[in-house]
Image (cartoon, rainbow, N blue to C red):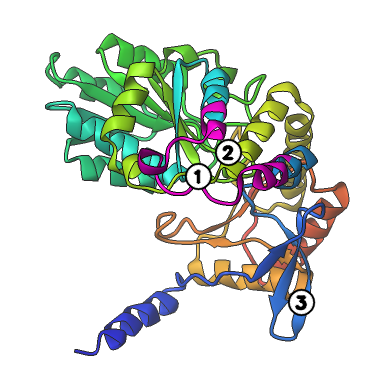
Amino acid sequence: MDFDALFNAQLDQLKQDGNYRYFADLERACGKFPKAASHFEDGKRDVTVWCSNDYLGMGQHPKVVDAMCEAVRRTGTGAGGTRNISGTNHDHLLLEAELADLHGKEAALLFTSGYVSNWAALSTLGSRLKDCVILSDAGNHASMIEGIRHSRATKVIWKHNDVADLEAKLAALPADVPKIVAFESVYSMDGDIAPIEAIVDVAEKYGAMTYLDEVHGVGLYGARGGGVSERDGVADRITLIEGTLGKAFGVVGGYITGSAAMCDFIRSFASGFIFTTALPPAVAAAARASIVHLKNSDAERLQQRRQVARLRAELDKAGIPHLENDSHIVPVMIKDPVKCRMLADYLMTEWNIYVQPINYPTVPKGTERLRFTPSPLHTDEDIEHLMMALRTLWRQCAMSRAVA
């Protein structure tokens, strides 16, 4: 059997549908973010990156860079294997203590990515709690969906951010079965924010555990960067808070926080923890430096909010449609996969602006968009250059405009 022919047939269909993903060949340069060198067929040139999840530019912050370099010189480059085999490096424990403090929890547990922390935690909880039912928000990330699926627990999907629907589904379940309400704080594609307090109120009413993914909230919200749950004053009422080190903290890795018993339970039973090589100690040291800095500095968050508001105001003036939300994510709606790819290509080749088109299956068909994430390091001049490009392309391509 010609397996490559089978692979290529499906890849060709993906291209015809406009959903094939091309990845830009970029070189990040420390100290130049959001600029990066992009490799083209005729050489390389600087482009401005507008879609990075390094939301605050902490991946190049001197404190973070210095912490990683110092740790590499002190400990070497790798962890040596799983913590189960090679032992826990002291830098892992220091970071876990910092994360537990960030969310006001007894303990924390590190994973190699936010995807793995969601997959491992939800699959372990769902499989080890007898007769468990997991109530999952309809907008949850693929990592949460995959963890729930792998757990083989009963899954109930409730309408996105619809507290009344959640309560109706909780009320229909037997009182004596373990229940987990799983949801996110900031949903990364639409940028909308969950009504966390109302969700927690309902979950507590029915004796359910709450599982909150703060991946797109940590570092960005709250007085110390603890996320939307810290900002809203409800972090102490949430059973498990999951987060990432790879977005606003600018490094890599994922984690969970909660009670000491729950973290030890997941540490002891989660295959995604037990059988995976640990994060390098230098990564842990750099992440800790980033968290400590953002616990004490609001400057990055305030400047980011200013630039987000500025971009939104300019889009409104130009009549360019974008989803309204209360977060840092600015989705410009195209609603056509081919046009979305085309606009992204024009921005890159003609304007030296990099933004990745977001198509199916990341978002539903018909909701394709360009997802902009202004950082505190995007200048007013960067915003004006982007708007000049968008105004020009909207006119040249006869794109639809927002109705005032």
Query: Which residue corresponds to mark 2?
Result: 284
Quote the CA–CA distance across marks 1 and 3: 32 Å
Query: Which residue corresponds to mark 3?
Result: 44
Residue at 47% over, 28% down: 194
Residue 263 percent coordinates (x, y): 36, 25
| Residue 137, visible in the rendered structure | no
Query: Which residue corresponds to mark 1?
Result: 279
| Residue 120, visible in the rendered structure | yes
Relative to 382, say whether 129 is above or below: above
Q: Are marks 2 and 1 in contact (CB under 8 Å)?
A: yes
Q: Which amino acid, mark 3?
A: Lys
Q: Which amino acid, mark 1?
A: Leu
Structural crowding at the residue carrying mark 1, measured as other residues with C-alpha within 10 Å and reported as few (<14), some (14–19) or many (≥20) = many
The magenta-colored residue range is 67-94
Mark 2 and mark 1 lie on one chain; the one further toward the N terminus is 1
Q: Mark 1 or mark 3, which is nearer to you?
A: 1
Quote the CA–CA distance across marks 2 and 1: 7 Å
Residue 286 percent coordinates (x, y): 65, 39
